[in-house]
Image (spheres, helix red, strand yellow):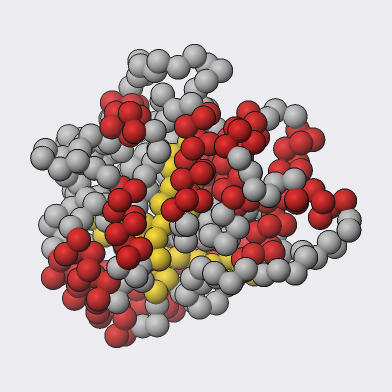
Amino acid sequence: MSDLFDGIHEFENLTRDAILDWLREDDETKLERLWHASNLVRRRFVGDDVHLRGLIEISNHCVRCCGYCGLRFENKKIERYRMSADEILACAHQALQMGYGTVVMQSGEDYGITRDWLTGIIRRIKKETPLAVTLSLGERSDEDFKAWREAGADRYLLRFETSDPDLYRFIHPSLPHRESDRMAILRSLRELGYEIGSGIMIGIPGQNYRSVAGDIESFRSLDLDMIGVGPYIPHPDTPLGMPDTPTALPDDEQVPHSEEMTYRVLAMTRLVCPEANIPSTTALATLNKASGRELGLQRGANIVMPNLTPSQYRVKYEIYPDKACINETAQCCHICLSGRIESISRSIGKGQGGRKRERIRKEPDMH
């Protein structure tokens, strides 16, 4: 067997300590091994197709006061909006015309999005198109999740952001009289029949390396179908975005919110969860507008999420500032991302692109 295939075995059955060592690794030669192995594992388990998920940011209202997010309830500097049902359906039909297999409806935790209203939209999308429907609407009731699943929603994304309970409470305070437990919600979503997705931010103030290694282990234990990992990008109108944000960690313990650290976590995630759908995120492209998405796709990712949100709303959905492609039209995003995918000799996937649970056992192409 070739040395190359032996190199992949180096990354099988990684323990937390081994993950931790790779997160701290600074030898460029060893990191090249990591990038190469994650790319081969990606090819072996999910193939060379890059699936496009059309993102529709349907509302920027939010009842939460998360310490890092520009949509937080206490931020009075942003103009709030909520898209109409007809506007959302128009975006879904645009996704179909562009050849996407999925639409992702995303918002803050907005209870102006009622159960029945969204149920009607999901039913219309499923009746009028063959698209998969992914929801990313924060923490909702079991009754909401059940109704939306019965209406035809296929997937639900709920990032747990960090598996460290103390750090989680610090950045994501619970609502009054309702403790937040996103791990439990993800398990409930699985029982309802959703494909489930989650993820983390990398470099949150107060986040240490062992915590991130624990996050990657949590991806494995939750058996996630979709996993998003992206850098923490400070927002000036949030508590964590202030210049004097306190952190109790020394510099050698604080995880940096850097492009390279994001690649390390992305690569380790692919190695630990080889079947998962993993995006090369907009946040990563924000750090490196020239080639961030391409490098993410070459280090384990197989998904990109072009933005379909109408331009008059897109600029108001400011989770963090200076987002990549903020002023581009949906058509421009589509053309640009298609070209970027083709430039690295990858193909655009067809169909809904759900998780492939039956693992491919053949050895990867060594050429």
From what the image shows, is residue 295 above or below residue 308? Answer: above
Q: Position of residue 333 (x, y in %)?
A: 48, 61
Return the residue nearer the eye: 159 or 283: 159
Quadrant in the rendering for residue 358: bottom right
Which residue is painted at 49% across and 14% down in the image?
Answer: 250
From what the image shows, is residue 108 above or below residue 93? Answer: above
Residue 87 seen in render: no
Return the residue nearer the eye: 365 or 126: 365
Quadrant in the rendering for residue 188: bottom left
Q: Position of residue 169 (x, y in %)?
A: 28, 32
> Outermost residue, right direction?
2
- Left of 293 or right of it: where is 177? left
Q: Position of residue 366 (x, y in %)?
A: 83, 61
Which residue is painted at 49% across and 71% down in the image?
Answer: 354
Which residue is painted at 57% across and 62% down in the image?
Answer: 275
Return the residue nearer the eye: 211 or 93: 211
Q: Quadrant of the N terminus?
A: bottom right
Return the residue nearer the eye: 119 or 360: 360
- Left of 345 or right of it: where is 308? left
Quadrant in the rendering for residue 46: bottom right
From what the image shows, is residue 151 above or below residue 300? Answer: below
How many callouts does the rendering have? Answer: 0
From what the image shows, is residue 56 above or below residue 11? Answer: below
Q: Position of residue 203 (x, y in %)?
A: 47, 31
Which residue is painted at 47% across and 32% down in the image?
Answer: 211
Q: Quadrant of the C terminus?
A: bottom right
> Outermost residue, bottom direction?
127
Residue 132 seen in render: yes
